[in-house]
Amino acid sequence: MEERDTNAQHFLDLIQRSRRGKFKVYIGMSAGVGKTYRMLQEAHTLLRNGIDIKIGYIETHNRKETHELLDGLPVVPRRSIFYKGKYLDEMDVQAIINLRPEVVVVDELAHTNIEGSRNEKRWQDVMEILDAGINVISAVNIQHIESLNDDVRDITGIEVKERIPDSVLKAADEVVNIDLTADELITRLKEGRIYTQDKIPYALSNFFKAEHILRLRELALKEVASQVERKVETEVTGYTGRQERFMACISSNPVTAKKVIRKTARLANYYHSKWFLLYVETPAEAPDKIALNKQRLLINNYKLAMELGAEIVKVESAGIASAIMATAEARKVTTICIGKPHINLFKVILSTNVFKSLLNKLSSSDIDLVILS
C-alpha cells in the first residue's frame, strides 16, 4: 500500500512539473550591466516569432536605450495600491494569471512588494506565475542572493537588504550571466548610462570601485558555473557526481549562526547536495530557561536555513558532541560544519570537552569537519 502511494505521488510530481512554466533568469554582477536591456531584446525576438509575450513588470530606471525597447511590446497594466497617503504601483499578478500569456517578463526579482500586496516578495509572485503554467523571464544581481550576503558585505561594506533565497535560482531552468569588464561598467557609469549625473561620484567611490566590481564579477561567474554544473548532473543520463551531505551545527549564539548557515549553504550549492541544520538543545537552553531574544534568533535562523534549502533537525541532549555524531551518522552526513570559536582554537581543543569529544568521535569515522571563519 505504501509503495503504491509513493509511486502515485512520484507520478503526480512529474505531471505537476510538466505543467509548471519554464523559468529563465539573467544574472549580473551589478546594476547597469544590461540585464533589463537583454530581456527586452529577447521579448522582441519572441514576439516576432509569434509567441504570446507580455511585460509583467519592467524597471528601465529612465535609461534611454532601455526605455525605447519597450515600444511595441504589450505591457500588463500595474496594480495601484494606496500606501502611506499615496498610490504606488506594483505588478498585477492576478491579471497576468488571468491573461495566461505564453511568456511574461518580470524585472527586479529581489524587489520587496508594497505592504498589502498579494505576496511579500516579487520572487514569490514569480513562483505563483510559474505554478500557473506561465513561462517567466526575470533578472537579479549577484548581491541579492541570500547565501552570498556576508561575502557581498565584506566586499562592498554594504548590507543588501533585499535578497532572494538560493532555492529561487535552483528552480530556474536556465541561468544566463550578463558580463562586462570592470572598465566597461565604469565607462557606462561615467557616461550617465546607469545613474543620473548627481549620483555618479558617490557610486564611483562606493559600489563601483574597480576592485569591488572584479570580486562581484567573480561571484557572478562562479554562481552561473555552479548552476550549469547542477543542470548537467540532473539532466545528463548516467552522470554520477560526488554524493556529499553537509550538516551545519549552530548554537543560540547570534554572532556565528548566520555565517555558518550561509557558508554551509554555499558548500551544499557547490556540490549540489542535501544539507541539514542541527541545533542541539541542552537542558540549560530548554524553552522555559532560554531568553526570549535567543528564542527569536533561533526561529529566524531556522527560517533562513529553510529558505536556503536545509532540513532542520533539533535534538534535545546534554551531550552535544554525541548528539552531533548520532545525527550525522543517522542522516549519512559526509561533512560537519561548525563556527570558529572566538578564542584560540588550540586552547579550545585542549580545554573544551565538547571539541575533544567531537574530534575523538570523528577520528574513527569517515566524516569530515569544517571549521568556518
Image (tube, helix red, strand yellow):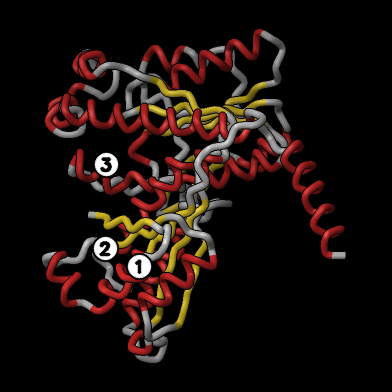
Q: Are marks 1 and 3 in contact (CB under 8 Å)?
A: no
> Which of the two discs, 2 and 3, sits closer to the camera?
2
In space, the residues marked 2 and 3 are separated at their CA atoms by 17 Å
Nearest to the observer: residue 34 or residue 195: 34
Residue 222 seen: yes
Residue underneath mark 1: 250
Left or right: 234, with 300 as reference point: right
- Packing grade of label 2 (10 A; few <14, some 14-19, many >=20) is some
Residue ID for mark 2: 256
Q: Is residue 320 above or below residue 210?
A: below
Q: Nearer the viewer, residue 137 or 314?
A: 314
- Look at the picture and state if 107 lies above or below 84: above
At x 19%, y 31%, the residue is 212
Which one is in front in this view, the residue at disc 1 or the one at disc 3? 1
Name the amino acid, label 2: Thr
Q: Position of residue 368 (x, y in %)?
A: 37, 56
| Residue that numbered label 3 is attached to | 152
Secondary structure of the residue carrying numbered label 1: strand
Q: Amino acid at mark 1?
A: Ile
Q: Report whether 142 appears left or right of 235.
A: left
x, y percent for residue 91: 55, 39
Q: Residue at x 53, y 32 (%)?
A: 106
Q: Is residue 105 above or below residue 81?
A: above
Q: Amino acid at mark 3?
A: Val
